[in-house]
Image (cartoon, coloured by chain):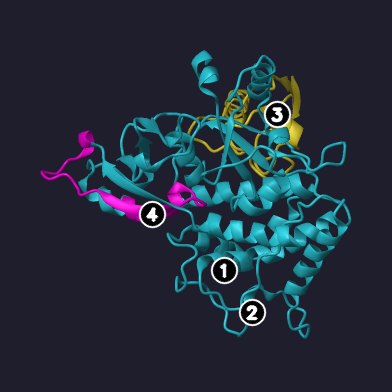
Chain colours: A yellow, B cyan
Amino acid sequence: KVTVTFKHAGDAPILKRSTFKLSASTTIAMTADQLRKQLGIAPHEPLLLYCSTAFAPPLDETLGDVAQCF
Amino acid sequence: MEGQMEAAEARELAWAGCIPAVFSLAQDEVTTLEPPPCYHANLPRQSWLPLVTGEVVEHFLPFAPPMARASSMWMQCRGEPLRWQVPVGVLFDLLTSGDDQPGNGDMLPWQLTVRFQARPTDQLRGSVDDAKALVRSALKESAFLRCGSAQPVMDLSPLDDARIFEALCSASPIEAGSPAPAPSSGGSPPPLPPPSCLPPASPVSSQAAAGQAASQQTPAGKQGQPSASDAPASSPYEVYCQARTPLEASLLRSLGSRGERAVPTRAFVAQREWRQLPVAPLLPSGDPTTLADALALLLPRAFAAASDAEGSGGEGQRPTAIVQGVVVELNTPVSWLYEACSHPDGFLYVVCLMPQSQRTRG
């Protein structure tokens, strides 16, 4: 399990709960899909995820690998 | 110092690597009486498909269905969709290697099918801007892995950013005479300073690299300006080297007296099966990390199975590692490999071919 904390930026909606424990094999794309459901963002609307406010990890990278790298 | 010169030569050879490819429009998408002629191109290994296939789109679009758009183009190799997020050379090695050998002459030219319709839902659109964004993000990622900060990449000047992508969009990056931006003063372009992946136990080579990078920043010593915009360039590769000079110098400044934190490495088994973990340049014992050590970290199951097989008397069970289309000995220091064979996004890509027995087991 990987503990992930989301921080909103710009005009992104604010999550009611910002910290989640997710499986290490979850990909960034799956995480984005879950966030869309939580925030009510339509599939055609852009949602960008940045790691350490610096870069966007590849969508098929797993949370486990991202956590170990960064 | 000799090792660094060899790495520089290897790096230029890697940049010279191209894959002859022939593109054809999918037969079920041809809407004209005559099918379009195939399009032949040399694809640079170091680049990404959307950056070097603009002319392919222009060639086939007139023959495609009426609602087709350039942005909807996607490609297949033997029926398998190509993920444009993977560099061209890595894609070729992944899709055409077999029997533990890199792609051989039978696979050339690389046959690719172009489509404009029915893109799989899990395939992202790949425009030139999308590819540039991906490369920039990967550059920041690799810088973060090396020195703990993406700031060196964020400090890249717009001119250097443009130069990097001009080199990546060129079909012949090491050929002289290819268009390059600006510079006018005399002197030969400075060689690219090697990234300081050398272990801290080699202070001489690290200091030499730092000194080389510092001297290239102020060649005349009068104005104290970086040399990136002063020296002329005659090939996109040389332009790229000039653009990377301030980036590498900035990375060295971020590192200070510490060694690099990690060697940015990605190990691919298939287009969608890959790992990325921080690979330390040195083992806890102080020895340089070899490719075998790195792959044991990145692909533990494959290497554990290989070790078990070797322990029980099996032979030829170790996965084969291919970097820039060449089979690499597993005892090669990963720091040297990174210096010589990393891609422009700052990552070392290693394609791992599993032994036949492991592929059979799935």
The crowding category of the residue bearing disc 2, from other C-alpha atoms within 10 Å (few below 14, some 14 to 19, many at least 20), is: some
- Where disc 4 sits, the SS reads strand
Q: Which residue shows up at 62% across the image and 83% down it?
A: B187
Precedes in sequence: disc 1 or disc 4? 4
Distance of label 1 from label 4 (alpha carbons):
20 Å
Q: Please tell me the numbered disc located at residue B42.
A: 4
Precedes in sequence: disc 2 or disc 1? 2
Q: Please tell me the numbered disc located at residue A27.
A: none
Precedes in sequence: disc 2 or disc 3? 2
- Going by the numbered disc 3, the residue's amino acid type is Ala
Mark 2 = which residue? B230
Chain hosting mark 3: B
- Going by the numbered disc 4, the residue's amino acid type is Asn
- Where disc 2 sits, the SS reads loop
Chain hosting mark 1: B
- Where disc 1 sits, the SS reads helix
Q: Which residue shows up at 63% across the image and 23% down it?
A: B302
Left or right: where B262 falls relative to B171: right
Precedes in sequence: disc 3 or disc 4? 4
